[in-house]
């Protein structure tokens, strides 16, 4: 039997067999179902089957009003839940030309960067877990729990914070928010050397990731990869630089771009991004402007009929929101262009020809969140 | 004296195994259903039969592992009597390991350690 | 599956037998010992579909640390697990997978429905065409833990409730299906 | 900042109606010469739209509107290509040879709207189960009680 992969045709010998790296699998971090055609340990073909966590958020949003559907998006990419809500609020504020006070902008940016930090920490822990190292998982959750404590103090809930509201933020920050954030940043900077000792300088980790899962720049562009996956292959695509929103035009940070494009490059980009996030937080934490934390938007939000587009940089890439409104209080059609959906496309070209162990390393470096793919 | 201790060892070994399995069969109960007997593969139907011919590479790996696993097993009795035998034991074990190291080199040269 | 009660003259206790001829007897002391052993070594299956899985990971990490209660060993295959914590939404495409995983777990097995999505469909209860409104329609559930996502303490509280429930059960009787 | 490719577009495609889609430059292209325009947009040196950021569709009840959001990483500008399809037999050429990201987008649009993409290597339902009827994101699709009927018909309920 023949199977056609891209352009070349591979004559598959008979002892090939197809296994499911299925919905319930420790390394897929969710319910991603990959069907692998194997020749021994070598992967010959890879077919993703999705939809195991497809909840139809886009169809649901068409029957919820503008203040309700925002909080469904924090169930899509739950590790950057705040950034998703921020994107929806920015889109709605752009649609109804609402004016957002400076204090709210800075608080939102601070919370977004803290979310990015917490998300990268969890990614770092689970990358170690995928490669067989269990202790990084516990080290990563030490700082992450402190950040979640801050979220809980200010917004009331740890993971899906529902903190953004069209027009600003739900309520003001907790009185000792500033002190706690400074304490965390200081402690995390001291502990960052442990992150390097545990994984970065670990010869086993390096031999499993250096040179594994190479994604060239042209292929990354053609696959529309965004976020750390694209920046590790040399594409400059940080929305915080390209189209600064909220308080990102006020801070100076550099966009981490490397050109190796393998798993270790993606790992390094995310580690450096953690440092940049702390850099941003330190620039903003001391001068949070006083004043209102939100402008009250009275009544039902009814944006004028038309199309609106807003994109933000989540922890995994560019989230684009295409909002089509017909003047009523419910969106006519809303499309979430999620980063993980196109990053998943990059999984196949990177893992073909490699071994199954490399596939696990590549999936860990892609940092996929499956509800973000299925929506 | 030797034969009785050997018998005790044999009986207690077999007995231990028999009790472990027997107790389990006696006390355990279970709802039998057809799905429980099917092979588990990440929660979905397996693609095609699961009794397929595996790639030969897997057997090569297990053979090389077996050689060095047995080597370790031989070291256990040696470690027990090592102190009484004295210096000669050290020479023997070095010789033993050296020969097996040659085996390792042979396997390495024949590329049995890398996956084709 | 019909479980029928048998009567033997020479044995005073209750004896149950199922279709496959498997019969089990009640011995109270061994029951208490077996239940104590089972409830303190429940091995959960690694089964996280969405946001609740992150709170389950937090419960597994050092701060909330569910290994104080014997839950630490999370197994990847249902063959070695005796508790399945359904953490995250179950959609229509995932329902047969969950049912198959539940069937492939050896007895005695328990189910914890973690999160509002598994109790009534949670935020996706209405207007969604592909979410199962409550997984007790598919698998018999022992403990429901509300919350979206529930805090790690809530998960630990739910697990302790399950342990109390196990301690109250008859250890060696073929349970009639819960529904 | 984001430049606007208006000048180049009008110069290369003078006859195409130019418009705005959410403050992005948009051109409306008819269904049958969509592929030629897209290859030109992809290969023309001064346009060089090398990334298909997003492919989505809107059910305008009278017709289906398909939107290609293209971006040039070298020129740093964006463009929206819009086409209208009638609901009867929605067919479009597949853009997989031009942009690899189109593969997953088109599978999703086929699953949600029923638009068939000719030449797609692996066109199947991406999110819904294989034996699902109907296209969920169409306005005519009613989403209530669909889940329970599916469970009943597939013997997934506990008492079945």
Image: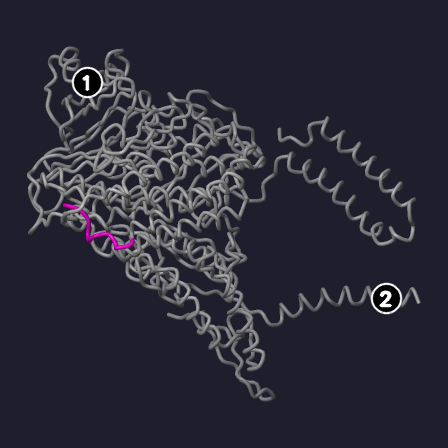
Q: Secondary structure at mark 2?
A: helix
Q: Can see residue C163?
A: yes
Q: Nearer the viewer, residue B18 or A282?
A: A282
Residue B26 position in % (x across, y down): 62, 71
Query: Does residue D91 appear left or right of residue D14 in this picture?
Result: right
Query: Does residue C137 appear left or right of residue A325 in this picture?
Result: right
Q: Is residue D133 above or below residue A241?
A: below
**What residue sits right under mark 2 in the picture?**
B7
Q: Is residue C34 above or below residue A189?
A: below
Q: CA distance from mark 2 to mark 1?
A: 90 Å
Query: Does residue C154 appear left or right of residue C10 in this picture?
Result: left
Q: Can see residue C124?
A: no
**What residue sits right under mark 1 in the picture?**
D33
Query: Does residue A303 appear left or right of residue C138 in this picture?
Result: left
Indicate the chain on which mark 1 is placed. D
Magenta-span inclusion, residue A173: yes
Circle 2 or circle 1, nearest the eye: 2
Q: Secondary structure at mark 1?
A: loop
Q: Nearer the viewer, residue B44 or C46?
A: C46
Residue A364 position in % (x across, y down): 45, 39
Give the residues in magenta. Answer: A166-176
Magenta-span inclusion, residue C156: no
Indicate the chain on which mark 2 is placed. B
> Which secondary structure class fits the magenta region best?
loop
Q: Please give the name of the residue rendered at 45% of the width and 59% of the height, measured from the top-left corner.
A: C102
Count of picture labels: 2
Quadrant of res A235:
top left
Residue A210 position in % (x across, y down): 52, 29
Q: Is residue A94 above or below residue C65?
A: above
Q: Is residue A325 above or below residue D99?
A: below
Q: Quadrant of the C terminus of chain A?
A: top left
The reply to whether discs 2 and 1 touch (Cβ–Cβ < 8 Å) is no
């Amino acid at each position: 039997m023949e199977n056609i992969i891209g352009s070349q045709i591979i004559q598959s010998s008979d002892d090939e067999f197809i296994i499911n790296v299925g919905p319930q699998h420790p390394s897929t971090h969710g319910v991603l179902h990959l069907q692998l055609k194997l020749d021994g340990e070598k992967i010959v073909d890879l077919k993703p089957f999705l939809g195991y966590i497809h909840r139809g958020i886009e169809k649901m949003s068409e029957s919820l009003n503008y203040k309700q559907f925002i909080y469904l998006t924090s169930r899509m990419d739950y590790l950057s839940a705040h950034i998703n809500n921020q994107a929806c609020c920015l889109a709605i504020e752009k649609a109804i030309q609402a004016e957002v006070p400076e204090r709210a902008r800075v608080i939102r940016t601070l919370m977004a960067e803290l979310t990015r930090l917490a998300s990268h920490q969890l990614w770092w822990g689970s990358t170690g877990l995928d490669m067989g190292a269990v202790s990084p998982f516990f080290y990563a959750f030490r700082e992450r729990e402190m950040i979640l404590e801050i979220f809980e103090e200010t917004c009331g809930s740890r993971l899906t914070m529902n903190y953004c509201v069209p027009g600003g933020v739900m309520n003001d920050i907790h009185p000792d928010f500033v002190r706690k954030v400074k304490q965390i940043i200081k402690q995390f900077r001291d502990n960052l050397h442990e992150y390097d000792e545990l994984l970065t300088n670990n010869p086993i980790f390096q031999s499993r990731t250096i040179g594994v899962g190479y994604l060239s720049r042209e292929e990354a562009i053609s696959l529309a990869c965004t976020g750390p996956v694209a920046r590790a292959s040399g594409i400059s695509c940080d929305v915080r630089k390209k189209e600064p929103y909220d308080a990102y035009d006020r801070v100076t940070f550099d966009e981490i771009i490397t050109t190796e494009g393998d798993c270790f490059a993606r790992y390094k980009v995310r580690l450096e991004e953690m440092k940049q996030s702390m850099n941003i937080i330190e620039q903003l934490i001391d001068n949070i402007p006083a004043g209102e934390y939100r402008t009250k938007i009275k009544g039902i939000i009814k944006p004028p009929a038309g199309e609106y587009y807003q994109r933000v940089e989540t922890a995994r890439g560019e989230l684009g929101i295409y909002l089509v409104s017909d003047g009523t209080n419910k969106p006519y059609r809303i499309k979430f262009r999620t980063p993980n959906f196109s990053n998943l496309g990059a999984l196949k070209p990177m893992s073909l020809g490699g071994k199954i162990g490399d596939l696990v390393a590549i999936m860990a470096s892609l940092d996929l969140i499956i509800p973000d793919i299925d929506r | 004296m030797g034969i009785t201790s050997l018998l005790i060892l044999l009986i207690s070994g077999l007995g231990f195994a028999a009790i472990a399995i027997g107790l389990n069969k006696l006390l355990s109960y279970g709802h039998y259903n057809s799905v429980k007997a099917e092979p588990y593969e990440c929660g979905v139907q397996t693609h095609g039969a699961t009794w397929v011919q595996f790639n030969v590479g897997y057997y090569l790996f297990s053979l090389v592992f077996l050689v060095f696993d047995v080597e370790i097993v031989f070291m256990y009795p040696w470690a027990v009597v090592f102190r009484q035998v004295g210096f000669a034991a050290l020479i023997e074990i070095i010789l033993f390991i050296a020969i097996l190291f040659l085996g390792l080199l042979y396997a390495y040269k024949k590329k049995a350690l890398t996956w084709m | 599956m019909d479980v029928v009660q048998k009567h033997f003259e020479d044995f005073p206790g209750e004896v149950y037998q199922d279709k496959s001829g498997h019969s089990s007897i009640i011995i109270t002391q061994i029951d208490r010992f077996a239940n104590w052993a089972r409830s303190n070594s429940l091995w959960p299956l690694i089964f996280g579909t969405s946001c609740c899985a992150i709170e389950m990971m937090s419960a597994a990490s050092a701060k909330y640390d569910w290994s104080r209660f014997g839950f630490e060993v999370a197994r990847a295959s249902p063959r070695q697990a005796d508790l399945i914590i359904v953490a995250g939404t179950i959609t229509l495409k995932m329902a047969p997978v969950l049912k198959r995983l539940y069937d492939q777990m050896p007895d005695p097995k328990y189910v914890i429905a973690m999160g509002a999505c598994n109790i009534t469909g949670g935020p996706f209860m209405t207007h969604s065409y592909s979410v199962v409104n409550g997984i007790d329609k598919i698998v018999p559930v022992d403990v429901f833990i509300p919350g979206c996502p529930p805090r790690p303490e809530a998960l630990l509280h739910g697990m302790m409730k399950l342990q109390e429930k196990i301690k109250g059960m008859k250890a060696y009787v073929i349970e009639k299906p819960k529904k | 900042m984001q430049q606007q490719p208006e000048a180049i577009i009008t110069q290369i495609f003078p006859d195409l109606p130019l418009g705005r889609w959410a403050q992005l430059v948009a051109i409306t292209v008819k269904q049958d010469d969509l592929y030629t325009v897209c290859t030109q947009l992809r290969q023309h040196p001064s346009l060089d739209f090398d990334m298909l950021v997003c492919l989505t569709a809107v059910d305008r009840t009278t017709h289906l509107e398909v939107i290609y959001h293209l971006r040039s990483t070298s020129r740093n500008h964006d463009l929206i290509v819009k086409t209208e399809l009638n609901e009867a037999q929605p067919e479009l050429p597949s853009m997989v040879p031009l942009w690899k990201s189109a593969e997953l987008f088109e599978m999703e649009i086929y699953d949600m709207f029923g638009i068939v993409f000719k030449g797609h290597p692996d066109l199947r339902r991406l999110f819904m189960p294989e034996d699902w009827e109907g296209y969920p994101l169409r306005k005519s699709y009613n989403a209530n009680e669909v889940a329970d009927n599916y469970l009943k018909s597939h013997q997934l309920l506990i008492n079945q």
